[in-house]
Amino acid sequence: MKPTFDEGAILAIERPHPKLWTYYLMVSLVIVPAAPILVPLHWFRYHTMRYKFTAEGVSMSWGILFRRQVLLNYARIQDIHLQSNFVERWLGLARLLVQTASGSSSAEMTIEGLPEFEAVRDFLYSKMRGVKDHHQAAPAVPAASTGVADGELANTLREVAAELRGIRLALGERTDRKEGGGHV
């Protein structure tokens, strides 16, 4: 199955789309009394936000005074959700909520400001599954390399099953003798 994303383009993503600043500005101006505080906060968040997609995982950082950085290996990712409100849909944006098995009910990382959010989600899912399949898959051993022919293996399994039946019957008879006529 051919992937629905361009891996090179996703690995090149480093910054959110400029429409995210438009969204932040609109959200800040809705609450008029708080706008003088929210506009600078959103401006700094937008201008310091960085993403890095690598072969091992994804990282996100933002902030000036209180710098925050989140690094996630693909193996830690448990689930990915897309979320967007009316304004984000109108601007063609969505947030990717990346969850891990950290015990927290909230997302470990929220990737926002990407117009190609579905391609990024598919990329993360493919990386997440690829890592898990790689670690969990046992190497396949062909029957010819075991040195045992199919008929010989089947006969050995029949012998083991017959032996187990015999043991079960012997244990059953022993239990019946103890319960029935052991003490007078």
Image (tube, rainbow, N blue to C red):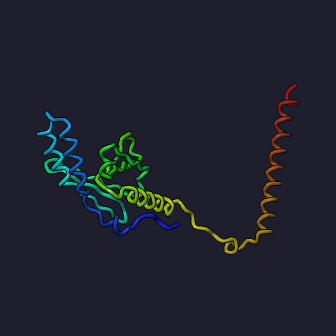
Residue farthest to the top, as pictured = 184
Q: Is residue 65 left or right of residue 85?
A: left
Q: Is residue 1 left or right of residue 116?
A: right
Q: Is residue 132 left or right of residue 49?
A: right
Of all residues, the one furthest to the front in this rendering is 90
x, y (%) of residue 47? 17, 54
Vertical placement of residue 27 versus 141, above or below:
above
- Name the quadrant containing residue 123: bottom left
Against 108, residue 33 (above or below) is above
The residue shown at (32%, 53%) is 92
Q: Nearer the viewer, residue 173 or 143?
A: 143
Q: Position of residue 184 (x, y in %)?
A: 88, 25
Depth check, front residue: 159 or 60:
60
Image coords of residue 155 (percent x, y): 81, 64
Q: Position of residue 28 (x, y in %)?
A: 19, 41
The quarter of the picture where residue 12 lies is bottom left
